[in-house]
Image (tube, coloured by chain):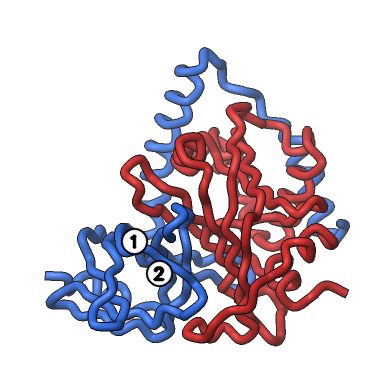
Amino acid sequence: MPSRAVEVVVKYRTCEFTTLSRDGSPQTWPVGALLLEDGRFLLCTTIGLPQKAFNIRRNAKVSLLFSEPTGSGVTEPGAVLIQGDATAEDRVVSDMMADPNLAAFMQTWFARQPAGAFMSSWLGRRLLPFYYWRLLIYVTPRQAVFWPTRDFASVPQTLDLSELRRVG
Amino acid sequence: MWAEAARWLAKFPEAVVTAVDAEGYPVSIREAAPRYDPETGQMSVAWPDGVAFAEGPANVLCHSHDEKVWNIKAMQIKGHLERSEGDCVFITTAFTPPPGMLVTFWRLSRTGRAAARRYLDNRGLTAPAVNWDAIDELQRRARNGQT
């Protein structure tokens, strides 16, 4: 039975992912992320929007805030902030089944965003031919906190990272 | 001066405020019912105890999606986060209104294509062939609820 904090990171559809730009300012995007069995997170980005990867290659420090419960089915929504170190592979992946974790990520994303099938439609392939040229991003959590009620003004609980490794 | 940012911010019930902590890691919280001053571009932030941040560069992100992760809306304000008389204040330095959905898509088609080409050219790579059969299969599994 996963903890409520783990339920948040597994079920929330998006999280706010932050990398650091060249001048040190944070850049934040809403993205999907998949918790892996070893406690890391997998994200990916297209080489048509490579800024996240470029930032990570200069500075590995990132954060993930899981705070948007819409569509998750979580009845008592909380929030989880994870800070960690990321790697962004240089390899361009165009076979979404080439890596089991990526396949799991994409299948989960397709289930959660059915209208995203447009991207692989006849028109989508022509308008955005780069959409499935992907870079894989792995985040290793270093510390995490949990707000049980989404009351962000309250002091959050420290989250034991071993909880993330137990589930995946 | 920041009326346009205020107008856009008012479309969202919450805002994600992100700064950087003393160890150099980004750190984010959500601000419920953000109170943003359109004259000064300042927004007081109820930053929680137990989550450290360092005064410096920051941003405010608002985004939303529906139950099926569609009808996505997003906007971002750049600025910095400061402590002022015991409070935490976000101060705007830049805001660009987000374009509409069609314009966003059109721009993505053009700029994304160019960025992808640069990425490949800089590495001496040719455009990789996408395995569309794999995508079809993963979409089929997703529709059938397979995990």
Question: Which residue is under mark 2?
Answer: B17
Residue at image location 47% in from the left, 41% down from the top: A59
Number of dots carrying numbers: 2
Cα distance, mark 1 to mark 2?
7 Å
Q: Secondary structure at mark 1?
A: strand
Number of other residues with Cα within 10 Å of mark 2, as a class: few under 14, some 14 to 19, many 20 or more = many
Task: Indicate the amino acid at tag 2.
Answer: Val
Q: Say which colour chain A has.
A: red
Quarter of the view holding residue B113: top left
The correct choice, above or below, for A126 with respect to A72 in the image is: above
Residue at image location 39% in from the left, 54% down from the top: A26
Label 1: chain letter: B
Q: Secondary structure at mark 2?
A: strand
The correct choice, above or below, for B52 with respect to B112 in the image is: below
Q: Are marks 1 and 2 in contact (CB under 8 Å)?
A: yes
B48 or B29: nearer the eye?
A: B48
Chain in blue, by letter, is: B
The correct choice, above or below, for B13 with respect to A6 in the image is: below
Which numbered disc covers residue A54?
none
Horizontal and vertical percent position of residue A121: 62, 44
Horizontal and vertical percent position of residue A69: 61, 76
Question: Which residue is under mark 1?
Answer: B58
- Residue A10 relative to residue B4: left or right: right
Does residue A48 show up?
A: no
A17 or B11: nearer the eye?
A: A17
Number of other residues with Cα within 10 Å of mark 1, as a class: few under 14, some 14 to 19, many 20 or more = many
Horizontal and vertical percent position of residue B76: 35, 62
Does residue B77 show up?
A: yes
Q: Quarter of the image containing the C terminus of chain B?
A: bottom right
